[in-house]
Every structure is written in C-alpha cells, then in structure tokens.
Amino acid sequence: LNLVIILEESLGAQFVGSLGGKDLTPELDKLADEGIAFDNLYATGVRSVRGIEAVLTCITPRPQLSVVKLGETQNNFFTLASLMQRHGYQTSFIYGGESHFDNMRQFFLGNGFQTIVDENEYDQPIFVAPWGVSDEDLFNRAHEEFSKAGEQPFFSLVFTSSNHAPFAIPPGRVEVSPYGPRETAIKYADYALGRFFDEARQSNYWDDTVFLVVADHSVAVTGGTLVPTERFRIPGVIIGNTIEPRRISGITSQIDLLPTLLSLVGLSSNHPCIGRDLTLPEYAHGAGRASMQFGALQAYLEEGQMVVLQNDLEPMTFKIDATGDPDLIPEGDPTLERKALAYALWGPMTIRNKAYFNMSENR
C-alpha cells in the first residue's frame, strides 16, 4: 500500500478535543473515530527536527543535535524513505515553506527522498504567510501529486506550517478563536486537513493508501517539573480504507509509528528501528514506554513512573499520578533507571558505530 505521513506543526494534546483539550480540532477528532487513534502518544522532543527524526528514522532522542542536522548522518542513514525506495516506492517530501530550513533538504535528499516540493513550486497560491504557503495550498499540491501516481506505489511526508508563529492564515476560513491567534491557526490547520481528507476519499489513491496524521511536537513545554511530560503528549491517528478503527490507550512513543506503519502497508524488511509494532497482540494497548529529550535532560516514562537523567547527577525516579504530577521516589528504581540509561545511550552509540545506517535486505 501507499503511505502518506502528515506531520502537523506544533499540535499538542491540549488543543485536541478528543484528547481532553480545547475543542479546536473537529476534523481530526472525526478521523480519530475512523482510524487507529492514540490516547497517550508522546513526542520525543520539542522541535520539528526531533519529530521528523522520530517519525522518519525511529531513532531514540538524545541531547545532541537531531540527525537531520548531524554531519555524519547526511548520507546512507536509515530512514523510512530510504527503506521504501529500496522496495520500489516513489518518495517525496511536500512542504509549504523553504525546504532548506533546519537542513531538511540536504538530509532528505541524502537519505531516500527522490522529490522535494517546497514554497518555490506553487503557482498562484491561495495565501502566502511568513513560513510559506497555506496548508490549503500544501494539501492541494499533495492531492495533485498523489492523484497522478497511477499504479506506482508512493511514500510521502507532508509537513504543515500554518500553525506556526506569527499564525498568519487565509481570511474567512474559520471563526476567530477567543483563546488567541495560535488557537485560530489550529482551527484553520484542522479545517485544511478536513478538506484534504474529503478530497482523498473521492480519489483514485484512497483505497490503496495508509495515512498517518501526527504532530511533530507540542508547544509551551515549560513547567515547574524537570520534564513536564504532559506537554509532550500529542495526537496521532492512522486512517485508511484498510484500517480497522480502535483506540490505543497505553503509553506510546513517536518511535513506535514506523514499524507499525510498515506492518499496515504490508512491507517486510530488515531495519535498525527498536520501536514497537503496535499491530502485534502484545502491544495492542500501547508500547508501554516513551523516551523524551528536554534540553540536556532525558526522561523515560513507563506505566506511572518516570526516570530523569541529568549530566553528572544520579538518576531520579518519580511516580506520576493521573494529572501528570511527579512525586519523587527517594530510593529510586534501579532496574528502571538502567533501562532509561540504555534508551539514552542507544542513539549516540549506534551513530558512532555506524550501526544505524541502511541495512542490506540479506542481513
């Protein structure tokens, strides 16, 4: 099957009605009822490149630079695009802004993306904001590209930008939110998303495509705790003609999306991803853990407990209640702390040893 990943800019769970947030995303909420919806999906970081890294490469987060910017990962590094290209897929990155931003263009072209569409390739766009063309323009172009694919299987990463400061959007599309300009931009981004899926359902590619809609990260990731885990919670929905609706209530990480999507599109391969395939019975209710990077801090969350790792300090283990508030466990949890350290060290170790690069299908 084809695969389309729609990466939504800066969309935290606090803005999504179906996740208990502000009622700003009725279109996304409808999709959640029709597909595989995640109730406790956690971003790995607080920047777009960290979200791209997790969704596209499945590598665990680290305080070091994202692999999108790291010098040694610009060629032959494992990505979903490079894997799918080896299996005969046409691969593309479709963006409304400048693709050179955050080194995306160089990283993508060196790691499996064959085609890049950015703001320079839109004729007579509906609206142009400081970050590029509107989400409507973006989705119109994506629909155009997918519609002409024919029998050729394709993978595409579509990255939105309308929900980004200064939140400039086309006039007259949605009512102004009383909460402020960010919330109005979220309403518009949701409106554009809904229009795209209305068109996609009538298209020649709908029956053969799996779609993932997921945020790159949340916003306002601050608070009185070392790592404000609730601010890492984001929406995620997998939808398509072949997808049976269900909700995944357990803790899940962005790194679990890649292996899950491979199963859903029917692609078997060797790869270095340690994310968990949520189509397997043992993970039907979630992956059970999430790893996060917050500045120089690393956090590992697992079923009501969180370990925080800090440079030159002993690990700290917290009990997390239903509201997300942490309560320090003075004696700690040595087993959980070693697991947290393993997740934190995995990424740098595999990059240093060149163990996270493209793998032969014969290995």
Image (cartoon, grey):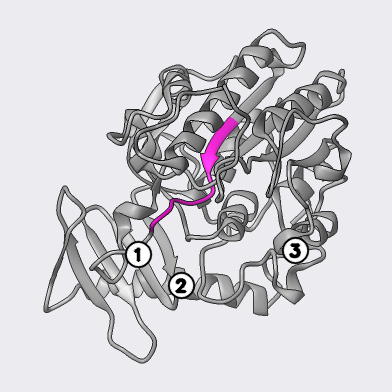
Left/right placement of residue 55 relative to residue 82 reads left
Q: Is residue 279 visible?
A: no
Circles 2 and 1: CB atoms closer than 8 Å? yes
Three-letter code for the amino acid on which mark 1 is drawn: Tyr
Please say if 50 is above or below 173: below
Badge 2 element: helix
At 75% from the left and 16% from the top, the residue drawn is: 205
Three-letter code for the amino acid on which mark 3 is drawn: Asn
Residue 175 place in picture, x, y as percent: 46, 24
Q: Quadrant of the N terminus?
A: top right
Badge 1 element: strand
Left/right placement of residue 119 relative to residue 131 reads right
Q: Residues within 10 Å of mark 3 (few under 14, many from 20)?
A: some
Three-letter code for the amino acid on which mark 2 is drawn: Ala
Q: Which mark is residue 344?
A: 2
Q: Which sits earlier in the primary sequence, circle 2 or circle 3? A: 3
The residue that label 1 is drawn on is 300
Q: Which sits earlier in the primary sequence, circle 1 or circle 3? A: 3
Q: Name the front one of labels 1 and 3.
A: 3
Q: Give the camera-side residue of 325 and 140.
A: 140
Badge 3 element: helix
Circles 1 and 3: CB atoms closer than 8 Å? no
Tell me, yes or no, whether the highlighted magenta stretch contains residue 218: yes
The residue that label 3 is drawn on is 103
Q: Residues within 10 Å of mark 2 (few under 14, many from 20)?
A: many
In whole angstroms, how far apart are the C-alphas of marks 1 and 3? 28 Å
Residue 321 place in picture, x, y as percent: 14, 53
Please say if 122 is above or below 47: above
